[in-house]
Amino acid sequence: MEFNFGTDLSGKVAVVTGAGGVLCSVFSKTLARAGAKVALLGRTAAPIETLEKELTAEGLTAKAYQCNVLDKARLEEVRQMICGDLGPCDILINGAGGNDPKASTGMEYYDEEEAKKGVKTFFDLDEDGIRAVFDLNYLGVLLTTQVFAKDMIGRQGCSIINISLMNAFTPLTKIPAYSGAKASVSNLTQWLAVHFSRAGIRVNAIAPGFFSTKQNAALLWNPDGTPTARTGKIIAATPMGRFGKPEELNGALMFLVNEEASSFVTGVVLPVDGGFSAYSGV
Ligand code: NAD
């Protein structure tokens, strides 16, 4: 089943960061199948090159560019390459993001006895890990937008989609830095939407609920494949009672990049979460 929802992106150039990852590889396929020429940006070459092969085998236009979103000189270099290969960027998906275990606690609630046993507490959070999470999630979006939004100035129908998360609305236990960093992504989305509102660039974010991917697998599944206690809590707090499937983000993506459907929509952070953010738990 295709998930283009009637959005035709023929002639558009879409740049996707984190394109080798679970969610953004799905976004990249959806954008390409809707007609966009897709630049696949990833920190490591292998997954984006595999995706390029898969999409070109379908007769679609996609090209892989190895690029760290924290390396502005490389981002500029890649922008020049994309302009030459595919054309200037119309759609930017800021998908690269994630947590660092060094910036997570091992316990949800502070417990002195557990701390004595060596379970990681707030006091053990690693400064470099916290900095890395804020750099990747916030600075990575900001630098990439600085580079690719230049292509959008003075042109019509351009938009930027950032990827936020449920922890941006209310922090999740154990992951303070990731929660703060994604809150800053939602905040930056609003700031950019206002800043570019008269330049014809719409800026929105998608806030996925809970999707079981390799990034969060260790938190959600025990080594023997059984669900962790955290998985039980997530499902209990998701009124629809299940994890989302990455393909279920496609409708939000296609809506937000569709110039007719969302021409007056900018600065929103759209939850796709089975009701998680609407539910108080009671
Ligand atoms: P993922 O780990 O599969 O994908 C993230 C991708 O980003 C990876 O391919 C990784 O190589 C790339 N990346 C990491 N650092 C990079 C850097 N410095 N430069 C360039 N690329 C870099 O994770 P995912 O679950 O597909 O997450 C994609 C986005 O969605 C992230 O922003 C994540 O925070 C967000 N998100 C995920 C979930 C979920 O449940 N999985 C939920 C909400 C939001």
Image (tube, helix red, strand yellow):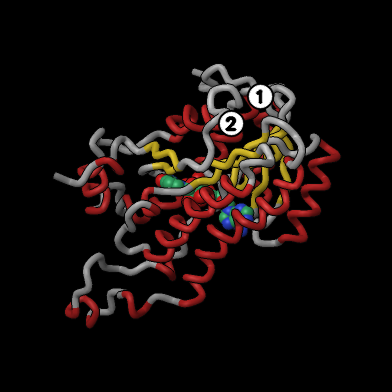
**Label 2 crowd (10 A; few <14 / some 14-19 / many >=20):** many
Which residue is disc 1 drawn over? 9
Q: Position of residue 33 (x, y in %)?
A: 62, 24
Q: Residue at point 25% right, 33% down?
A: 240
Badge 2 marks a residue whose secondary structure is helix
The answer to whether residue 94 is above or below residue 53 is below
Badge 1 marks a residue whose secondary structure is loop
* Amino acid type for the residue under numbered disc 1: Leu
Which residue is disc 2 drawn over? 257
Q: Quadrant of residue 50?
A: top right
Q: Quadrant of residue 117?
A: bottom left
Name the residue at the left extreme: 282
Q: Position of residue 82 (x, y in %)?
A: 79, 42
Query: In this orientation, which residue lies closer to the viewer: 49 or 72?
Result: 72
Residue 102 in view of the camera: yes
Query: In this orientation, which residue lies closer to the viewer: 202 or 86?
Result: 202
Relative to 141, 23 lies left or right: left
The answer to whether residue 28 is above or below residue 44 is above
* Quadrant occupied by the C terminus: top left
* Amino acid type for the residue under numbered disc 2: Val
Q: Contact, CB < 8 Å: mark 1 with mark 2?
A: yes
In primary-sequence order, the first of circles 1 and 2 is 1
Q: Residue at point 69% right, 41% down?
A: 199
